Amino acid sequence: MVPPEWYLLLASGVFCIGLFGILTRSDALYFLMSVELMMNAANVNFVAFSLYYGDLTGQVFALFVIALAAAEVAIGIGIILVLYRNFGDIDVTVPTEMRW
Amino acid sequence: MSSVAPAWSALSPALLLGLTGLALLLVDTIRPNERSNTSMAVVSALGALASLSVTVWFVIAGTGHADTGGAITLLEGAVKVDTMSLFFTAIFASVTALVVVAAHDYFHDHQRPAAFYSLTLFAATGMALLAVANSLAIVFVALEMVSLPSYALVAFLKKNRGSVEAGLKYFLIGALSSAVFLFGISLVYAATGSLIFGEVAGQIESLDTLSGVAGIGIVMIVGGVAFKTASVPFHFWAPEAYEGAPAPVSAFLSSASKAAGFVVAFRVFTEAFPLGASLAADINWVLAFGVLAAVTMTLGNFAAAVQEEVKRMLAYSSIGHAGYALIGLAALSAGSAGNEAVMGAAMAHLLVYGFMNTGAFLFVAMAERWGIGRTFEDYAGLARRAPVACTAMAVFMFSLAGLPPFAGFFSKYFLFMGAIENGFLWLAGLGAVNSVVSLYYYSRVVRAMFLDDPATPSALDAIDVRPTALYAAVVFAAVATVLLLPGFGPVIEAAEAAAAALF
Amino acid sequence: MSDWIAIGALAAVGLLIPIGMMTVSALLRPSVPETGKSTTYESGETPTGGTRIRFNIQYYMVALLFVVFDIETVLLFPWAVIYRPAIEAGVPMTDLLWPMLTFVGILAIGLGWAWRTGAVEWARSSRAASRKTERDINT
Amino acid sequence: MVDAFAYVPAVVLLPFFSFLVALGAGKYLPKGGAFGGIAATAGSFLLSLWIATAVAGGRAYNETLYTWAAGDQFELTFGALIDPLSALMLVIVTLVALLVHVFSLGYMNDEGETGLPRYYAGLGLFTASMLGFVVADNLLMAFMFFELVGLCSYLLIGFHFREPGPPSAAKKAFLVTRFGDYFFLVGVVAVFATFGTAAFAGEGSFPALAEAALAGSGDVWTPGGLELQTWLTVVGLLVLGGVVGKSAQFPLHTWLPDAMEGPTPVSALIHAATMVAAGVYLVARMYGFYALTPTTLAVIAFIGGFTALFAATMGVVKDELKQVLAYSTISQYGYMMLALGAGGYVAAVFHLTTHAFFKALLFLGAGSVIIAMHHNEDMWDMGGLKSRMPVTYYTFLAGSLALAGIFPFAGFWSKDEILYEALVHGLNEPLLLGGYVMGLLAVPVTAFYTFRMVFLTFHGEPRTDLAADPEPVRWNVKGPLTVLGSLAVVTGFINMVPVQKVLGLEGIDYLHRWLDNEWGGIEGLSSHHYADLGPYSSGYIAGGEVPTVLVGAAVSLGLALAGLGLAWRLYNVTSPTEHTAKLGGIKDVLYNNYYLDELQVWIAYRTEDIAGGADTFDQGIIDGVVNGVSSVSLLGGSRVRRIQTGLVTQYAAMLTLGLIALLVLLGVNGGWFL
């Protein structure tokens, strides 16, 4: 059996890749994908430790997370659409009318 | 209570809110082309009020109270109805009712207002669910259930660049924060093997080598909570979202959504990560909340002092108030008898804040409805045209500033007092200094409305309509703020009882 | 450990075969460059306009609805898996059925609302209509 | 018989109803709701008299009337505490409020002011809050009404809100007093934290608990193992912050002169007789607590003495009638603080009483002059009003004689007693003696500026056409002036301690006996008890009590007369000049006289220099500090807001950094990385 630390390392790696994407990309779609990556990193943990502890909660919760992530993407795409209509771009650094 | 009714009926406040939202969708499905703004508003307000009355009835009947058999748990312990959940559900339902009533006038010329009402009610359902959550899984699902409609609500004015920009920023920061939150939950699950609060608490003390994992997880959960409560450094979305969103939505987010964040924080950090056990595992989250509270109230108040627009000032002031309420978590110490007093005071502050802050934002909604400008100068002389509303606004401002004898003074007083009793003099002192700063910018509004002259004589001619429902909501919020003076005794007692059940 | 060798071998073979076939064909076939070969493949039609056209907005609407409802079905599978064993273990039918019916019911209300409010009505957009007539004139 | 004490809430509520009536229906009432206010304050006054009679009948009252909120650790209650002190204060406040209401008919209604309902509503609310403050039976309730009083003064000072001056003066008054109030609030919290109660009187009251704790019995909380005496001193000083703000003591006195922008009756009510009195009253109310901490008492005495002198010197150079009165108010409250700090509880209350009457009188007299002068307040434009408005002149003169401390007017008795107390207690306490010397030095200055004002205003020849033909005033102005004028003459006789001591007559020090619970009162709230607690012992000069009394009285009266005489020489001429140096140029004056004049001029110049310096200090340093603090806050705010750049990716970055910072903080704290 794979030691649980490895799963933790994998999940952390994926999470950090997602975070890196968020910090470096200004395209809204990349932003969404990066968030998905971070959520799936959490899912790796859930499923792995569900197996480790012999407890189904983690797996079921991972399913819920997938569904919620999809819903979040749906909302996100909707907002990106109206963003494009109003600002003519999906670059998230463009709308800076409100600040300070 | 629980002996005569099935146990699931303890969830009826949340269910009522959800069913009302669904009913609105059904009605709109059946008659999609009729613009029935009024009936929609009435139905949603009735739903929220029904939920409120059931909640109040439960509180009076003692549902979930220790005297009547203790908290009611459902769904294998994932849901728990107790006094605190009812207390917060009352806040959510009241704010929702105020907001939907006010929205009736705000969206009077909107094409499809039905979506607004159902989204608001779905978000309220999520909040009510948050209040009863007893498992990290439910917490996350309910949190998303609050967040997702909120994103859509902020961006509800699809053709308004401000609204869209606000929605985008809110969504992006929100998505990032919920991912962080989720990862935190997964780490806690990895360390303890459970998501139910009680079981997590049982494991925390005996973590041994995994305490670092759990610690990182807990800090990430703190982050998720801080996002929902708009606390520094997760607050960046708040000024923009509150400023750009339609004002009723700002009211909803800054009052109800913030309270929802706090109910999660209160429950998670007392039941899942109890202080004594956390300290034994070297996870001093009180320190984290102390830092957050200090930074949050300072940043919020100082930034609010230099704003030019009233709505953005209110946004920052709302951040400052999150800092005050965080004292409820930051001023705890293991095993101290004063813990319930300080947390109870924070809850009472959130209730009072729910009314006064909602009222203030709804006043801004009224100003937007009239079409006068957004800055302090644009409010000059407003009291001459709208004396009742301006008096109400003055009540909100003074109460927010914590000026005696308004209700805001009492809640803040009890809060600082509790912090001092628990040995956190520095937090209370910082809070007092910040209150002084806050008086400056709140009184600017009052001065503009009552003492200043309008820039041009015709500046106020825009006020030609009397939005009845908005007026009603604002006045009702003001009356509630005032009525909380004599009613503060029962409120603080209920809050302290709710907090006592947590420790 | 031997299981992993098999998997590794399978992966190696899976990679080698297509790469080998492409290499061999590239070596054997004659090279005859021609404009018709480099144009976009449109099922035999002559392509019109650029490739960077704006998609109809309703394409996204349908895609959104699809994503949401598709993913929700993920939650149906575990339920379906335990349904029969649970019945056999003596759990009352209503306890099993009602939650899922409620869930599907809520989804149905949402879908119905989206449908009735025009999210899936394809031809109502005036821009789409005008574009369609335009293309008809061209052909 | 109906119990008088059952009507205590009514005393407070009557003016509150007049506030509601004026606010709600003032527009439809004749005179903008003035009569409602007059009726309400008259009712309150009569009830107060009845209550005072009941106290004189040997009874007292200390009840919790309403429990607002009862928390786990502490509770908020409303109650009423009626003892000789509060009964006396009730009578003073209601009487002055009644007279001010009547006077307002002349000053506001007859002058055709607009916004009268707002004005009378403000007066009503103000009176109600002040009365609530007076009857408060615990510190928290007192604090709330204290704040309300501040709010009302904000509303009333800024009454003429369309002009530039009043709103900013109102804001300043509000902010400066609130600055003090925040210390007060912290003090209230500290009292609660220490004793678990904020009640003023009774077995479980906080002064009693403090006394017991100092005596070694009883257990109270102190932060961080601080020594009890030190902590009590800190608490006392915190509460004193509010007092210094409200009673306009150095360095928080700056708001009061500005507050003269308000209508004159408001100045009379707020800045002479009641609101400013609130601070002093509060110290008197919890004197059982202050008496326990010698350091606090010394601070109070020193602040008081310094303020008395400092403000008096500034009064010398002011040209506007109300400005002179404003500085004299600050100075007189300095005397009261000096008395309290010197252990002269009765003397302070005595001066509070006499001052309330003669200062209200002077303000109303000034109001009368201002009506006559069509709202010109510059004294250099007046002159010769004596023959044209005799009622105003003679009442004003009575008030001035009282203020200057001339025998036998009210102010003489009370000021003399203050100085006496400071002297006999100060002989063993250097700091207190310093206070006494400053108080004594202020006496001639006070007499000088008071009579400079009187002579410039009423004597000599009219210097402008306005002064030659003043507008007449009606009964509603003269009536209150007459009442207060007689009071200014006779109030002093309620407490003739020097006479008693010198002649050996027993029992004519009525106020002493009143405050010593001789007729009735509450155990532990008597001047006798306070004297037992106090840290001071008495010393005498010239070999005994009687000579000390005589010497003290003679010195202060002599100094007052000297100041009066100086003013007489410089200003009681047909055409006084601002720069008195010209007097020296008159050739026909005798050499000796010339020399004397030179001296006078030199003294006047030096005084003016000092006064000018104090004024500069006041305007430059104190205001500078206040402004500096606010601009630093605003600067901080505008720096802070810059982190909100509007770029969402930067938000994400800062959010991540914040999270990492939290992780590192907790990690290092919990030792995860080890």
Image (cartoon, grey):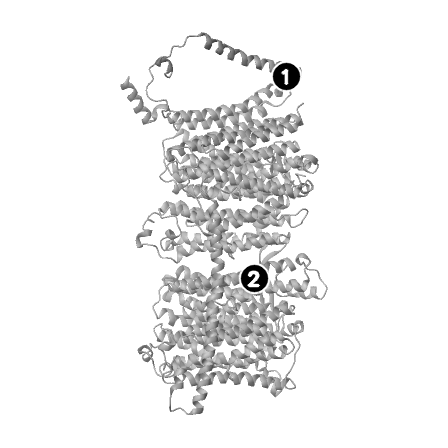
Would you place residue D334 above or below residue B421 in this image? Answer: below
Picture quadrant of residue D519: bottom right
Q: Which residue is mark 1?
A: C4
What label sits on residue D184 in the rendered view?
2
In this rendering, position of residue B290 left or right of residue D27:
right
SS label for mark 1: helix
Would you place residue D485 above or below residue B208 in this image? Answer: below
Q: Amino acid type of disc 2? A: Phe
What label sits on residue D204 in the rendered view?
none
Spatial CA distance of label 2 from label 1 is 77 Å
SS label for mark 2: helix
Front position in the image: D496 or B154: B154
In this rendering, position of residue B493 left or right of residue D411:
right
Would you place residue D29 above or below residue B82 in this image? Answer: below
| Chain for numbered disc 1 | C
Any part of residue B303 in sight: no
Quarter the N terminus of chain D occupies: bottom right
Picture quadrant of residue C85: top right
In this rendering, which labeled residue sits more in front, label 2 or label 1?
1
Q: Residues within 10 Å of mark 2 (few under 14, many from 20)?
A: many
Q: Position of residue B156 (x, y in %)?
A: 41, 37
Quarter the C terminus of chain D occupies: top right
Front position in the image: B263 or D247: D247
Q: Residues within 10 Å of mark 1 (few under 14, many from 20)?
A: few
The answer to whether marks 2 and 1 mark residues whose Cβ atoms lie closer than 8 Å is no
Q: Position of residue A23 (x, y in %)?
A: 50, 35
